[in-house]
Amino acid sequence: MAVLRPKSTVPTKRNKPAGIKENRLFNTLNVLFMIVFTTIIIFPIWDVIVGSFSSSASVATPGIRLWPEQFSLDAYRVVFNDPSIWNAFLISVLKTVIGVTTSVFFTAMVAYAMSKQDLIGRKIFIALGVGTMFFSGGMIPIYLLMRSLGLLDNFLVYIIPALFSFYNMLILMNFFREIPTSLEESARIDGAGVWRIFLQIILPLSTPVLAVIALFNGVYQWNDFMTARLYITNEALYPIQMKLYEIIVQQQAANMQNVVGSVIIPTSSQTIQLATIVVATVPIVLVYPFLQRFLISGMMIGAVKE
């Protein structure tokens, strides 16, 4: 009597499902696409880094640079010997650290209150907030407001206007709604007040989404130069991005004078621009890996809907 053997479920070369081949083809094309896409993104950054370590003569030569033809640290010597650069760097660090800390805490505090369904006037507050997302007062009214508040040529102009973001408040509010109310009720039974529940229970449970909001605020604060451009005239309060903007404007003015007067300017201002870009970009790039794991989980929180 013949014994029937079950068919093997392990795919072989003969019975390999078509789905596996399609997946391999998709993965291969996906990897190739990501390699090309990543190269397109990384190459301009690499070109700036290489140009900052090159001599002014090699930077002036048109063409693609994969490696410094004439290695030079002159641009970085000029940048780091300029005391205004260090002062601008300090202002950027202070505005980023203070701005992110205060903005995240204040926005989380408002979001926690708005997550309560029994808050009086909650729907009115949300309707007013949504209106501000679509309609702005305009540049001139905002400038007049800043002048009335005494924020012109004041360091607080970096902090107070960025203290609250309604969009970030909506993200935090939706996250706080997912926290079980029984957790807060248990804390109240143990005698905890509102502030203790918020500081010792809600905020520690919200670390991923707070890290995402902090990263968004940090990138904005570090790269923002329009605030200084509009409201600051005292150079001692310029952030590093505004200093970089000044260097670029000076370079453009020097180029125009060079064209009009046909005068050769033997300076390395272009390499100084590139070196300043590298100096201004490195700190925010170094911070990103430490927040990446929180960023992934925080994005998942905002993406999943049940």
Image (cartoon, grey):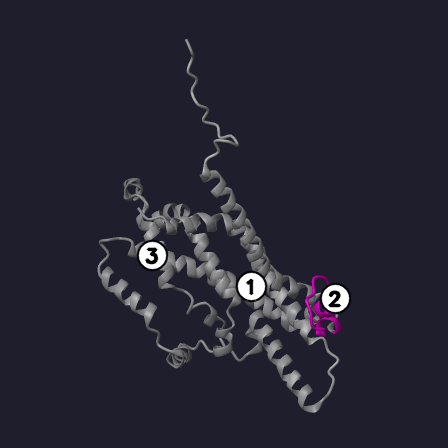
- At mark 3, the secondary structure is helix
Q: Residues within 10 Å of mark 3 (few under 14, many from 20)?
A: many
Q: What residue does disc 2 label?
A: 73
In this rendering, does residue 239 appear at all? no
Which badge, 2 or 1, is on the more N-terminal residue? 2
Name the residue at the front extreme.
1
Is residue 38 shown above or below 246?
above
Q: Residues within 10 Å of mark 1 (few under 14, many from 20)?
A: some
Whether residues under marks 3 and 2 lie with C-beta atoms below 8 angstroms apart, the answer is no
Whether residues under marks 2 and 1 lie with C-beta atoms below 8 angstroms apart, the answer is no
Left or right of 110, for residue 147: right
Residue 80 appears at what percent x and percent y? 69, 68
Amino acid type, label 2: Leu
Q: Which mark is residue 111?
A: 3
Name the residue at the right extreme.
70
Amino acid type, label 3: Ala
Q: What residue does disc 1 label?
A: 93
Quadrant of the rendered image containing residue 61: bottom right
Which badge, 3 or 1, is on the more N-terminal residue? 1
From mark 2 to mark 1, how far is it between C-alphas? 25 Å
Left or right of 275, for residue 179: left
From mark 3 to mark 1, how far is it between C-alphas? 26 Å
Whether residues under marks 3 and 1 lie with C-beta atoms below 8 angstroms apart, the answer is no
Q: Is residue 95 magenta?
A: no
Left or right of 143, for residue 123: left
Amino acid type, label 1: Val
- At mark 1, the secondary structure is helix
Residue 56 appears at what percent x and percent y? 73, 73
Residues drawn in magenta: 57-77
Q: Which one is nearer the viewer's eye here, 49 or 214?
A: 49
